[in-house]
Image (cartoon, helix red, strand yellow):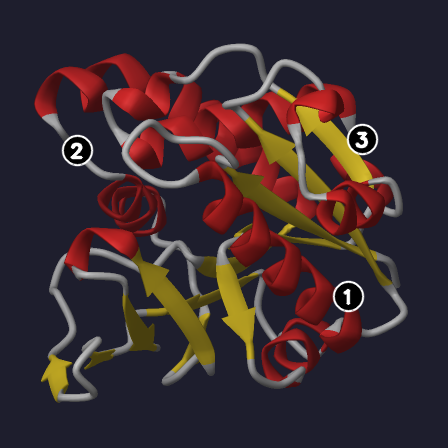
């Protein structure tokens, strides 16, 4: 049984230091490579650079040479980050044969994986879908803590898994809705929620993910998911 991890990335954004962001991606990808089981392949897709030569972090560049790496030369994520990630997923499916894999994991790469448990859960899925909507523990830069409860009517899409056939169905569903979602500021998490519920898809559930998220918008805080 062979599985694929699709990793969405945006290495360079205007409002954040490219050097810092590349370094964050390097350590996140390095940790991911440590944690995944042997039956997983990794594909990384970026929508902010023109070529690998735009990356100045030699460590990151070296790691990207060890995985499947794609560059999408448009970035609708400037209008809606989630739709930009879905655009990367669609582009990846056009360049990688998803049917070569049993399950496809959707993963936003700028997350630090703390243990391999979530990938073991993918390998042992009883249904064709693995979803979550965990609370966030905000770790402020001054080391204060704040917990945020789960948000209703969405499924977290920083990490989820679908069977390859179901992921291809999700891609077709998303293709038809990207323009509408852009116009109406509908996020990718709501898009996933609508797909699952409109099609009455059964799923396995993850209470927690064990991921550390970096949020540059909130004073460079960390978030435990």
- How dense is the environment of label 3, judged by Cα within 10 Å: few (below 14), some, or many (20 and up)? few
- Mark 3 vs 1, N-terminal side: 1
Camera-nearest residue between 39 and 224: 224
Q: Is residue 131 above or below residue 82?
A: below
Numbered tag placed on residue 186 in the rendering: 2
Residue 190 is drawn in which quadrant? Answer: top left
Q: Is residue 130 above or below residue 147?
A: above
The mark closer to the camera, 3 or 1, is 1
Camera-nearest residue between 4 and 44: 44
- Mark 2 vs 3, N-terminal side: 3
Residue 15 is drawn in which quadrant? Answer: top left
- Identify the residue shown where x is 20% and y is 87%: 143
Q: CA distance from mark 3 to mark 1?
A: 21 Å
Numbered tag placed on residue 97 in the rendering: 3
The answer to whether the residues at label 2 and label 1 have Cβ atoms under 8 Å apart is no
On-image quarter of the C terminus: bottom left
Q: Position of residue 174 (x, y in %)?
A: 40, 27
Camera-nearest residue between 187 and 201: 187
Q: Is residue 60 above or below residue 120?
A: above
- Mark 2 vs 1, N-terminal side: 1
Left of 83 or right of it: where is 10? right
Q: Secondary structure at mark 3?
A: loop
The mark closer to the camera, 2 or 1, is 1
Numbered tag placed on residue 33 in the rendering: 1
Q: Position of residue 68 (x, y in %)?
A: 81, 38
């Amino acid at each position: 049984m062979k599985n694929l991890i699709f990793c969405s990335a945006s290495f360079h954004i205007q409002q954040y230091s490219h050097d810092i962001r590349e370094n964050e991606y390097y350590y996140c990808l390095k940790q991911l490579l440590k944690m995944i089981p042997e039956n997983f392949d990794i594909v990384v897709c970026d929508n902010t650079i023109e070529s690998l030569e735009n990356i100045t972090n030699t460590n990151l560049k070296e790691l990207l040479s060890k995985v499947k790496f794609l560059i999408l030369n448009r970035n609708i994520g400037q209008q809606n980050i989630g739709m930009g990630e879905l655009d990367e997923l669609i582009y990846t499916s056009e360049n990688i044969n998803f049917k070569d894999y049993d399950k496809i994991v959707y993963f936003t790469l700028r997350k630090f994986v703390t243990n391999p448990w979530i990938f073991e859960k993918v390998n042992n899925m009883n249904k064709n879908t693995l979803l979550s909507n965990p609370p966030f523990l905000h770790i402020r830069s001054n080391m204060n803590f704040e917990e945020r409860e789960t948000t209703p009517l969405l499924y977290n899409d920083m990490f989820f898994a679908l069977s390859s056939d179901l992921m291809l169905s999700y891609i077709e569903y998303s293709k038809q809705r990207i323009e509408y979602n852009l116009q109406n500021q509908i996020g990718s998490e709501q898009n996933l929620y609508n797909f699952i519920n409109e099609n009455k898809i059964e799923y396995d559930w993850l209470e927690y993910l064990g991921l550390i998220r970096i949020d540059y918008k909130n004073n460079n805080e960390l978030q435990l998911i």
